[in-house]
Image (tube, helix red, strand yellow):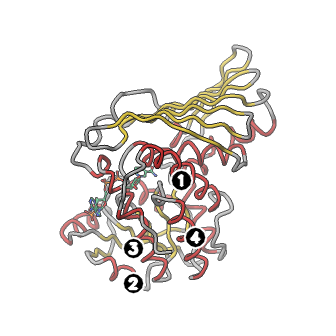
Amino acid sequence: MKKVTYGILSTASIVGRFIQGIRDSKNGDVRAICSRDIHKARRKAREFMIDKAYDDYAQMLADDDLDVIYIATPNALHYPNALQAIRANKHVVLEKPFVLTKKQTIHLFEEAKKHNVFLMEAQKIVFLPITNHIKQMIQEKTLGELRYVNMTSSFVARFGYEHWMYDLQYGGGCLYGSCSYTTAYLMYLLDTLDIKGQGMQIKAPTGTDDFCQLQFSIEDRVMVSSCISMNVETKNVANFYFEHGYIEVENYWKARTMKIVKDGVEEIVEYPCPCEFVYEVDHVNDCIQNKEYVSSIMYPEITIKTAELVDEIFNGWNPELVREYAKCEE
Ligand SMILES: NC(=O)c1ccc[n+]([C@@H]2O[C@H](COP(=O)([O-])OP(=O)(O)OC[C@H]3O[C@@H](n4cnc5c(N)ncnc54)[C@H](OP(=O)(O)O)[C@@H]3O)[C@@H](O)[C@H]2O)c1
């Protein structure tokens, strides 16, 4: 069977790991990379051993050798970058947080349908074997009913105030950066879109949220507390509390291991793998090869519901803010 071929948009810090995921996948191949700067594109192409380097996105999109575009640009550019790729009839894997608003989210999925191309939010967390193990334990009530989830994550000192992650216009901040890890994870685990949320923020001098504390209630039966921060170093951990025990998952968005505690007895479960992106990429390849252009795992409704929750929380924090990048064609 023909391999699924990828073009990579940007030389972002994350792309090396995604490329590794493609290379570790059963049927994927990386053929091109595009940067705003041709020297950077060529340098990265050499570093990652990719054949073609582009500095013109439209040219990369015109390359018939490419099936899928993986987009890892600043958050506010996701919408225009993905729209352009879809209209060039390319399949698209779009980094989280997908786009900035619910309206943009719905519009992109409508355009993908119109052009008969695959479109999915790159949310590797739902494809991890650990995630599926937890999902099974929830469904089978191995530890009784799930009642409470407490998650903390931080990425301190990774970016300076000059970085786009501190720029509201570019969709910076903790809420945009990581809310989807919490919401997509929980909607997938509990197989529901019935989730309500609210949030508090502490702002950086640039106006983006530097620290946010989010609370969700799922089906009025599971409480969730999710703390995301760029200004304090927390443990990166998700704790799932059940009636008769708990599960602790460190680095939950890329976990290979978890601790299960039942009646005071600890068990460690491990799923070793060199690159955690491989499960997501295998799924994308399967979908495209089978001409299934809507993912049955990371399905659009999860992405749309996350965008709705983020809209509500973000607009509550910044009611007066007008952002050029948040506009939608429709
Ligand atoms: N799934 C995951 O595990 C994961 C992890 C981290 C990040 N992400 C997501 O991936 C995306 C990239 O994040 P990152 O932290 O890797 O980004 P980053 O290192 O800051 O890189 C962003 C890239 O976008 C390109 N770009 C285009 N226009 C730009 C502009 N006006 N300003 C700055 N850069 C511009 C640049 O590439 P060129 O210079 O080559 O054009 C730059 O290297 C984000 O949406 C983020 O949420 C996902």
Indicate which disc, 2 or 4, sits on the residue closer to the N terminus: 2
Amino acid bearing label 2: Asp
In the orientation shown, which residue stands out farthest toward the top?
264
Q: Tag 3: Cα neighbours inside 10 Å, few (<14), some, or many (≥20)?
A: many
CB under 8 Å between callouts 3 and 2?
A: yes
Mark 3 or 2, closer to the camera: 2
* Numbered tag placed on residue 211 in the rendering: none
* Numbered tag placed on residue 31 in the rendering: 3
Q: Which residue is mark 4?
A: 109
Mark 4 or 1, closer to the camera: 4
CB under 8 Å between callouts 2 and 4?
A: no
Amino acid bearing label 4: Phe
The CA span between labels 2 and 4 is 23 Å
In the orientation shown, which residue stands out farthest toward the front?
320
Would residue 49 be found to the left or right of residue 218 on screen? Answer: left
Mark 2 or 4, closer to the camera: 4
Where's residue 323, x and y in %? 36, 59
Q: Which residue is mark 2?
A: 63
Indicate which disc, 1 or 2, sits on the residue closer to the N terminus: 2
Indicate which disc, 3 or 4, sits on the residue closer to the N terminus: 3
Is ligand 1 closer than 8 angstroms to the Cβ of mark 2? no
The CA span between labels 4 and 1 is 16 Å
* Numbered tag placed on residue 123 in the rendering: 1
Splitting the image into four quadrants, where does ligand 1 fall? bottom left
Q: What secondary structure is marked by label 2?
A: loop
Where's residue 221, x and y in %? 74, 34
258 or 223: which is nearer to us?
A: 223
* Residue 191 drawn above or below residue 37: above
* Residue 112 drawn above or below residue 139: below
Indicate which disc, 3 or 2, sits on the residue closer to the N terminus: 3
Would residue 153 be found to the left or right of residue 295 on screen? Answer: left
